[in-house]
């Protein structure tokens, strides 16, 4: 996207500790948000009711987080959920630590699993995106990185979490350039100054240490459809949500 402002979504995981979640939707709309990005189990009990609550608030759902095992073992269920929510992006976000293996073949296998799900999703005009944490940037014994094996798989796209990339010791600018043609969503998670204990060391976008104005031109070189704010443990979800949205708009994003 060039020039125009990005739509901005809110990752609902950010305010998981402040129920009822659906009561937050009108407030987020009033702050200027365009969409909600839900995580499991927020939509699981009744996807149709979740969609109605979004519609009532005037919010969209561009994409949603879902389990990798669900994509591999029950893709049709999650394809149906995507259709119900009106989403275009199915986003597995995690491999549990006990399942991870420190080999290139293991991570190539994760990529293959995502690619198989992407084939099923493509028949319904849906895309599969991987969402990173920090572990994908730890070097394996052969010097390669899990993230590169995952994204080498065909038709696997990327929801890039800038905060976790930074915590993983990688360079956000370099990753934006490396995967410009795979990045469809950019999460603008920010990191508080080193040593900060409050809110687990995370910060609202613009209040942390990531240089967003320097990264903004690189955002424009990707295929990102929208931005998504997230904070893993905010003490005040409203302050985080409003500050992050307003900051992104203030820097022209």
Image: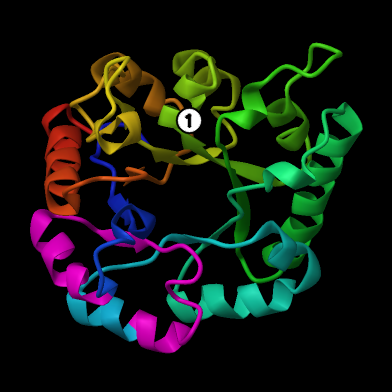
Q: Residue at x 15, y 33 (%)?
A: 247
Which quarter of the figure has residue 98? top right
Number of marks drawn = 1
- Above or below for 55 versus 139: below
Say few, some or many: other residues with alpha carbon within 10 Å of mark 1 (under 14 / 14 to 19 / 20 or more): many
Q: How is the image coloured?
A: rainbow
Q: Residue at x 69, y 57 (%)?
A: 68
Q: Residue at x 78, y 46 (%)?
A: 99
What's the magenta region? 22-51
Q: Which one is in front, 253 or 113?
A: 113
Which quarter of the figure has residue 33? bottom left
Which residue carries the number 1 mark?
164
Quadrant containing the N terminus is top left
Direction right: furthest residue? 105
Q: Which one is in front, 198 or 247?
A: 198
**Residue 190 falls inside the magenta stretch:** no
Q: Which one is in front, 147 or 120?
A: 147
Report the side of 199 relative to 164 (left or right).
Answer: left
Place of residue 51 in the rendered image (x, y in percent of width and height, measured from the top left): 37, 80
Place of residue 171 in the rendered image (x, y in percent of width and height, measured from the top left): 50, 13
Report the side of 77 relative to 211 (left or right).
Answer: right
Place of residue 203 in the rendered image (x, y in percent of width and height, measured from the top left): 25, 32
- Above or below for 202 versus 195: below
Secondary structure category for the residue under label 1: helix
Q: Which one is in front, 59 or 46?
A: 46
- Above or below for 50 versus 68: below
Quadrant containing the C terminus is top left
Q: Residue at x 26, y 71 (%)?
A: 19
């Amino acid at each position: 996207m060039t020039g125009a402002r990005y739509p901005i979504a809110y990752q609902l995981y950010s305010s998981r500790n402040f129920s009822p979640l659906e009561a937050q939707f009108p407030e987020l709309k009033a702050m200027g948000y365009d969409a909600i990005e839900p995580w499991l189990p927020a939509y699981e009990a009744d996807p149709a009711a979740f969609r109605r609550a979004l519609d009532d608030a005037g919010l969209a759902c561009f994409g949603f987080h879902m389990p990798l095992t669900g994509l591999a073992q029950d893709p049709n269920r999650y394809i149906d959920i995507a259709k119900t929510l009106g989403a275009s992006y199915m986003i597995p976000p995690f491999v549990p630590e006990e399942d991870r293996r420190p080999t290139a073949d293991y991570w190539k296998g994760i990529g293959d699993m995502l690619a198989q799900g992407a084939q099923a999703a493509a028949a319904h005009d849906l895309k599969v995106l991987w969402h990173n944490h920090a572990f994908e940037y730890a070097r394996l014994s052969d010097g390669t990185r899990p993230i590169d094996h995952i994204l080498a798989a065909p038709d696997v796209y990327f929801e890039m979490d800038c905060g976790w990339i930074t915590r993983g010791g990688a360079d956000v600018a370099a990753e934006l350039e490396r995967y410009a043609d795979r990045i469809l969503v950019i999460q603008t998670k920010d990191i508080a100054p080193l040593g900060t204990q409050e809110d687990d060391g995370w910060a609202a976008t613009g209040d942390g240490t990531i240089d967003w104005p320097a990264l903004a031109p690189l955002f424009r070189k990707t295929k990102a459809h929208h931005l998504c704010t997230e904070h893993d443990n905010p003490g005040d979800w409203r302050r985080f949500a409003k500050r992050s949205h307003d900051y992104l708009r203030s820097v022209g994003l």
